[in-house]
Amino acid sequence: PRGAMADWLEDDDDVDDRQFEHKQRERDLDRLERTMMTLGYADGVSAGQEAAAQASFDEGYRQGLENIRADEVRLRSMVATVVEFYGQHGAALGQPSSLTGMVFRGEPQLSGEEVVRRLDSAVRGGADTGADPVWRRLLGIGETEDPARATFSKQQLDVAISGMLTG
């Protein structure tokens, strides 16, 4: 009888162990599912924020480029007009017959800053706006370069103006 009793207790222990293990696995799976849902939610929020930020950046970049391009196109057309006008009528008006001649006024070399100032004055009718970033870009003066240290000869300016009109 003692052996039968021991078998019965052992069978009962096996059932309890299996039920305990089953419940433990269910709890572990529930915990894992909650963790995965939390991580999935966090990843989704992060991906959504990245997508929104990227879309906003792309739109701002596009608008900025449109503004820069519009300024460049406007300035290029003004340069073309001045070049054409003084090429045809400069001598009759007692003025140099080229934009380069108007800018240099007989000087062999000028600083980039002075070239920008004089170009701006000639093209925009005397309005001195300083070292305009569009002029700097069109003349190839780097963003970090000091325009006062960059120097231009008449030939360099002719090449730059030609590039503006064909570029």
Image: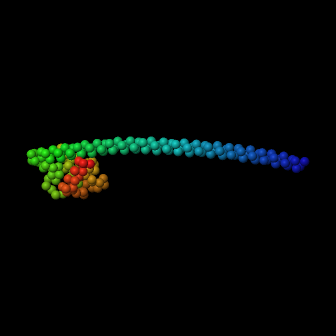
* Residue drawn 22% across the image and 50% down it: 162
- Of all residues shown, which one is farthest toward the right? 1
Residue 13 visible in rendering: yes
151 left or right, relative to 18: left
Q: How is the image coloured?
A: rainbow
Q: How many marks?
A: 0
Query: Is 117 left, or right, of 35 in this rendering?
Result: left
Q: Which residue is rendered at x = 31% and y = 54% of the image? A: 144
Q: Position of residue 20 (x, y in %)?
A: 73, 45
Residue 136 spot, x, y in % from top left = 26, 51
Q: Position of residue 16 (x, y in %)?
A: 77, 45
Q: Quadrant of residue 125?
A: top left
Q: Is residue 150 above or below residue 122?
A: below
Q: Quadrant of residue 40?
A: top right
Which residue shows up at 17% across the image and 49% down it?
A: 99
Q: Residue at x 14, y 53 (%)?
A: 105
Determine whether, in the image, residue 95 is placed left or right of residue 34.
Answer: left
